[in-house]
Image (cartoon, grey):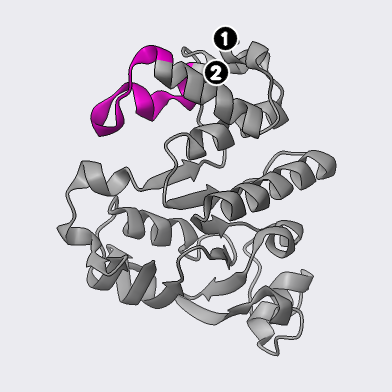
Amino acid sequence: MIEMTDVHKAFGSKQVLRGVNLTVQSGESMVIIGGSGTGKSITIKCILGLVHPDSGQILLDGKNVEDEERDAFLAKFGMLFQGGALFDSLSVWQNVAFRLLRGSLKRPKDEAREIAIEKLRRVGLTPEVADQFPAELSGGMQKRVGLARAIAADPEVIFFDEPTTGLDPIMAGVINDLIREIVVEMGATAITITHDMTSVRAIADKVAMLHGGKIRWMGPVAELDGCSDPYVDQFIHGKAEGPIAAVR
C-alpha cells in the first residue's frame, strides 16, 4: 500500500531523512519508533504530500503521491492527532463529521450527523455526547472523538500520532484496543508513531526503528524483543547507556 524508496529531506543544513526505505503492506499495522527529532513526523508528512522530499520516491497503492489529485488523494487518509486537535467552536458530532460537511466527501447534514453518531458509538461514546463541545469532555473522551473523526470517512490508510499521549494507563489500554479492533474491522492500513512500548506491542504487526534519518531495523513485532541491534535494544528497554545519546 505504501512504499518509500531512498527518501531524503533536509531543512537548510539539517538533514532529517537520509534515505528512508519503508514498505507497508495493505491491511498491515506498522508502528514507527524512535527518539524525538528523528524524523518520524516528517516521514508521515512526506507520505501525505504536506512536505516534499528532496529526492527518492513515495508510492501509494503503486502510484506516485506527487502525481495524485490532492482532494481525491487526501480522501484516502484518516488521522488521529497527538493532541486531539478538536475544534473548540464545533460540537462533537461536527468535529467527527468535519470532512463529511465539506469538500469532495460532502454529505447532506442529516446524513453526516448520523454517520458521526455511529462512529461515536463505535468508539464507546453515547449519542448524548454528540451535541456537547470538546471542552466538556475528559481527555480520554476527546481522544475517542479524535479516533471517531479519523475513521468517519472510512479511509484506506489511517495515521496515529502518539495515540496514548497524556492518558492514564487504563485509558491508554482502552485506546490501544480500540485502534487494533477498528483497523482489523476496516481492513485499513495503519501507520502509528509512538514512544509507548505498550502501544507498540498492542497494535503493531510490524515495527520500524527510525534513527539518524534511516530505518535501522524493521520486522514483525514478535521479533522486536530479540533484536540484536544496539539502537533498538537501548530504545525499547529505555537504557540510559548505549549508542543513542540523551538530549540534555
- Quarter of the C terminus within the rendering: bottom right
Instruction: Report if residue 69 is visible in the image.
Output: yes
Magenta residues, dominant SS class: helix
x and y percentages locating residue 4 in the rendered image: 35, 73
Taking the image as shown, residue 158 lies to the left or right of residue 233, namely left
- Dot 1: within a 10 Å radius of its alpha carbon, few (fewer than 14), some, or many (20 or more) residues? few
Answer above or below: position of 221 versus 97.
Answer: below
Instruction: Report if residue 13 is visible in the image.
Output: no
- The alpha-carbon separation of the residues under discs 2 and 1 comes to 6 Å
Q: Which residue is mark 1?
A: 131
| Residue plotted at (68% across, 86% down) | 230
- State the count of labels: 2
The amino acid type found where label 1 is placed reads Asp
Dot 2 and dot 1 residues touching (CB under 8 Å):
yes
Mark carried by residue 215: none
| Residue plotted at (60% across, 27% down) | 120
| Residue plotted at (63% across, 76% down) | 244
- Quarter of the N terminus within the rendering: bottom left
Q: Quadrant of residue 148?
A: top right
x and y percentages locating residue 197 in the rendered image: 73, 62
x and y percentages locating residue 139 in the rendered image: 69, 28
Q: Secondary structure at mark 2?
A: helix
x and y percentages locating residue 45 in the rendered image: 36, 54
Taking the image as shown, residue 147 lies to the left or right of residue 136, namely left
Of labels 2 and 1, earlier in sequence is: 2
- What is the magenta range? 94-110
Q: Which residue is mark 2?
A: 92
